[in-house]
Amino acid sequence: MRIVSGIQPTGNLHLGNYLGAIRNWVRMQDEVAATGGQCYFFLADLHAISMPHDPAELKANTREMAAALLACGVDPAKSVLFNQAQVPAHAELQWLLNGTARMGWLNRMTQFKDKSGKNREGASVALFTYPVLQAADVLLYQATHVPVGEDQKQHLELARDIAQKFNNDFGPVQPDGTQTPVFTLPEPFIPPEAARIMSFRDGTAKMSKSDPSEMSRINLSDDPDMVMKKVKKAKSDAEPLPSDPADLAERPEAKNLVAIFGAMTGRSVEDVLGEFGGEGFGKFKPALGEILVEALRPISARFVELKQDTPELDRLLATGAARARDAAAKTLAATYEALGLLR
């Protein structure tokens, strides 16, 4: 297996990032490395410039994201960790694939409509062609599998469409008449327990760094006292926890806290309610807080340490980028050759 996955360097990482994506990266790297495969994990800084941004903030956030991934267990000895901007082949391949991608395909991308809002004419070209760069990201490394959530399935389907059309249009024809594909068609990989973590202030909204309330989220940099404080002050209700998971349907805050407990302990919602059903939040929240404190304590300590060591972060990203450039070179050369471009 060759797995490729990226994450935008947004900064201020929180529990939702950890349980929703980063923890699964660590699991994948260990499983894939054990079978002789390879994981490519990148910080999507080229994608970040498709929206208005502050250059100094982007640079700081890229390092911070790298520190978070390393603190959570992403191992440069097992995975290739890098930022896109140090691997020009991503941007090169995007341009080469722009000739194959179709306007109609991109017009159907729902994420562009969501991010551009009512001012589509004022959106950047980069935001419109963002999915082609995503296709380049995975096709460049001949990815066999790409971890996807519901919001990314459409983009992976586009990557497959682009790869299939390119292979049909430009794949070299062998003497026996068979056509050799240039790109591998990546398959979706649904990570196990891809937890969707909601805000501590509103159980119907995702936990987010953009929420103005610090009490809405647990940051990976929070110390144990702050973690416990935020859990105890998390919005809940006056009713005790039910014994039947179905009874959580109309109680979003309670459902969120139970889901976090299950995700952190590897237990099902049914199992968690089997222990705490009938109990109030006065008992449940301290138990959840202790679990989060113990799990996040070493991550937080390592994260804070790494954030302060800029030279080491830069060295690790540069090393990973060199490996990525080497891995990308063959695919990029084959693409230029297939298109008849002299280099």
Image (tube, rainbow, N blue to C red):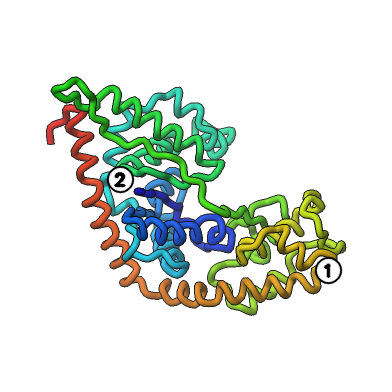
- Taking the image as shown, residue 159 lies to the left or right of residue 293, namely left
Residue at x 16%, y 25% (from the top left corner) = 174
Frontmost residue, 83 versus 196: 196
- For the view shown, which residue lies furthest in the right direction? 239
Disc 1 to disc 2, C-alpha distance: 51 Å
Query: Percent from the top left, x then y, of residue 98?
Result: 33, 30
Label 1: which residue? 280
Residue at x 38%, y 36% (from the top left corner) = 132
Label 2: which residue? 141
- Taking the image as shown, residue 191 lies to the left or right of residue 33, namely right
Query: Percent from the top left, x then y, of residue 43?
Result: 40, 55
Name the disc covering residue 316, or none: none
Q: Earlier in the sequence, mark 1 or mark 2?
A: 2
- Taking the image as shown, residue 317 lies to the left or right of residue 30, namely left
Frontmost residue, 142 versus 12: 142
Residue at x 74%, y 56% (from the top left corner) = 255
Q: Amino acid at mark 1?
A: Gly
Query: Percent from the top left, x then y, of residue 83?
Result: 35, 55
Point out the image quarter for the C terminus: top left
Q: Amino acid at mark 2?
A: Tyr
- For the view shown, which residue lies furthest in the bottom direction? 225
